[in-house]
C-alpha cells in the first residue's frame, strides 16, 4: 500500500493543476471533511445492523461507501499538506494521549466516554 | 512517513486491546468521522482569514488542530480496516472520476461545483 | 407554546445586543447548525438502544440534550431571520414535496430512501 | 406565523402516517439533523461572500436553501416531539446561560468563543 506522502502528492497535483489552492483555506477544507463524512453517514441513516451487513457485501453499496471514504481522505490529506501537519506523527501522539484517557483495564469492552462516570 | 498500513495497524491494536470491535459498526464509525470533523470545523467557526492565519502559527492552535485531524484519521482508518476498503485504491479511483467531472481547462481557478452551470 | 416569530426575536435581540450580525453570514451560520447538531449526535456515539433509553430519563442527560437542541435551533432561527426565510412555509412546502417522494402506501413501515429500489 | 406546536403536529402526522416512529430513535434523528445541516453547509462550500450574496437573491438558490432549512427543522421538531423536549423553554434557558458566558460588554463585536482568552 502506498505511503501517506504519495497520496498527499496525488491530491496536491490534482488541486494545483486546477489552481484550487486559493480556495483551500482551513475553514473550507474542514467544511469539505464534514460534508463528505456526512454523506458517508447518510448512507447508514435509519439503517439496521442487518441492512448494514447487506450493504457491506453489495457491490454498488461498497462502491458508494468507498467514494465517500476517498472524499474524506482527499480533504484530510489536502489540509495536512497545505498547513504542514504530519498526519502519522499526529496520530501517534493522539493514540498516546488517548491511551491515558482510556487505560486498557478500565476501558476494556466499555463504550463509555472518558468524561462519563 | 509511515505507510497507511502501519497507521491502520496502530489504530487496530489500540481498538482491539480495548475490545472495541463490537462498537465499530459502519454507522458509529461514520458518526465518529462526522463528529471529529465537526470539532475541527468548530475551531474555525466565525473566524476571519486573518484569525485563521494567526491560529496556524500559534503552537496551542496547531496542537488542537493536529488532534482533531488525528481523530478524523483514526475513524477513517478504523472503517477501512474493519470493512476492508483499500484507501489508496479508493482515492486513486475517485481522483480519476473527479478528473472527468472537473476537466482542467474548465475547472481552472473556478470554485464551481460540477453540478453548477 | 410560543410562536416561531417570538423565538426568532429572542435570538435576534441576543445577537444584536452583542453586534454579531457581522459574523452571521450564511456559511458560518450553517457551520453553527452542523457543529451543534454534531455535538448532539456525539452524545449518542457508540450508544446502544438501552443506553439511550436510560439517558432519556436521566436528568443530567436530558439537560445536555436540551442544550444541544437549543443550540441547533438558535442557528436555524438566526439564519431564517437574517436571510428572510419563512420556516413554517418552508416546512409546509417540504412536507408536500416529501409526500410525493414517499407515498403512504409504499413507504409505510419502510426505512428505504426514495432513491433506493 | 404558526406556533411551534402546530409545526410539530405536521411533522408527527407525516411520520405516523408512514409508521416511522420505529426508526426515530435519538441517534438516527440526530444523524438526520447533522446530515441535513451538512447539505445546507455544502451549498456554501468554497463560496466567497460575493457568491453567497448572489445566491441569496437567486430564486433557485433560495429554494434549495429553504428546503435544507426545512429538513433540519423536520428532525429538530421530530426529536422534540418524540422525546418530550419543550424547544421554546430550552431556547430560553440556553439564551440565559449564554448571556452569562457572553456578557454584552465584553462580547460586543467580538467573534471569540468564551473559552478563548
Image (tube, coloured by chain):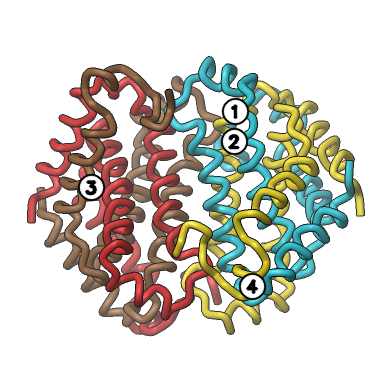
Chain colours: A brown, B red, C cyan, D yellow
Evaluate whether label 1 is on the same chain as label 4: no
Q: Counting other residues with Cα less than 10 Å from the Cα at mark 2, is it few (<14), some (14-19), or many (20 or more)?
A: some
Evaluate whether label 2 is on the same chain as label 3: no
- Residue toward you, D6 or D65: D6
Evaluate whether label 1 is on the same chain as label 3: no
Q: Nearer the viewer, mark 1 or mark 3?
A: 1
- Whether residue B61 is visible to the viewer of this picture, yes or no, is yes
- Marks 2 and 3, how far apart at CA: 36 Å
- Marks 1 and 3, how far apart at CA: 40 Å
Q: Quadrant of the C terminus of chain D?
A: bottom left
Which numbered circle lies on residue C60? 1
Q: Are the two marked residues, 2 and 3, in contact with CB atoms closer than 8 angstroms?
A: no
Name the residue tied to disc 3.
B87
Which chain contains the residue that carries disc 1? C
Q: Are the two marked residues, 2 and 1, in contact with CB atoms closer than 8 angstroms?
A: yes
In the shown orientation, is residue B47 left or right of residue C114? left
Residue C73 x/y as whole percent: 70, 50
Amino acid at each position: 500500500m502506498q505511503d501517506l506522502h504519495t497520496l498527499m502528492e496525488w491530491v496536491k497535483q490534482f488541486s494545483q493543476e486546477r489552481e484550487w489552492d486559493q480556495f483551500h483555506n482551513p475553514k473550507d477544507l474542514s467544511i469539505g471533511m464534514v460534508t463528505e463524512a456526512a454523506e458517508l453517514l447518510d448512507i447508514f441513516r435509519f439503517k439496521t445492523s442487518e441492512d448494514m451487513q447487506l450493504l457491506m457485501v453489495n457491490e454498488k453499496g461498497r462502491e458508494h461507501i468507498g467514494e465517500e471514504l476517498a472524499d474524506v481522505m482527499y480533504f484530510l490529506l489536502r489540509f495536512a499538506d497545505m498547513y504542514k501537519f504530519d498526519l502519522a506523527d499526529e496520530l501517534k501522539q493522539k493514540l498516546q494521549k488517548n491511551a491515558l484517557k482510556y487505560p486498557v483495564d478500565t476501558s476494556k469492552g466499555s463504550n463509555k466516554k472518558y468524561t462519563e462516570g
